[in-house]
Amino acid sequence: MTITRPTRDSDSTPTDALPVSEQSAQARRGIHVIGIWLQAAFNSFRTPLIFAAAIVIVAETGILLGAISLLEWVFLGEDDTVDDNSEGD
């Protein structure tokens, strides 16, 4: 099976030739791998594998959001725009 990338027009280079950062390229590969995993599980009617993939996606999302929040707190400090007034005034 050959996978080809679409081009913008007949005279241009493939979209893979466009400059991308290494982090962006890694993220795209990761999303592609998760997509392959989910599609393979769906096509083979392996319900437990689909749920496992969903759990992995949710767990990775939670870990990444937590890490980003922690880094923001460490480097930027607490959010001082929030009013700590409990009366609601």
Image (spheres, rainbow, N blue to C red):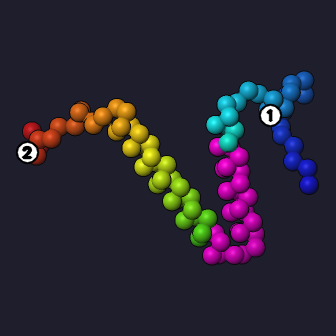
Q: Which picture quadrant has residue 1?
A: bottom right
- Mark 1, residue position: 16
Which residue range is magenta in the image?
Answer: 27-50
- Can residue 8 be seen in the rendering of this structure? no
Foreground residue, 21 or 14? 21
Residue 41 as seen in the image, left or right of residue 51:
right
Q: Which picture quadrant has residue 69?
A: top left
- Mark 2, residue position: 87
At 34% across and 32% down in the image, what residue appears?
Answer: 76
The amino acid type of the residue labelled 1 equals Asp
Instruction: Give percent across and percent down for residue 77.
Output: 30, 34
Q: Does residue 23 sit above or below 11 in this rendering?
A: below
At 84% across and 32% down in the image, what residue appears?
Answer: 14
- Can residue 24 be seen in the rendering of this structure? yes
- Marks 1 and 2, how far apart at CA: 56 Å
Quarter in which the C terminus is drawn: top left
Instruction: Give percent across and percent down for residue 4.
Output: 87, 43
Residue 60 as seen in the image, left or right of residue 19:
left
In the rendering, which numbered label is found on residue 37?
none
Mark 1 secondary-structure assignment: helix
At 81% across and 29% down in the image, what residue appears?
Answer: 17
Residue 69 as seen in the image, left or right of residue 58:
left
The amino acid type of the residue labelled 2 equals Glu
CB contact under 8 Å: marks 1 and 2 = no
Label 1: how many Cα within 10 Å (few below 14, some 14–19, many 20+):
few
Mark 2 secondary-structure assignment: loop
Instruction: Give percent across and percent down for residue 53.
Output: 61, 65
Instruction: Give percent across and percent down for residue 45.
Output: 72, 75
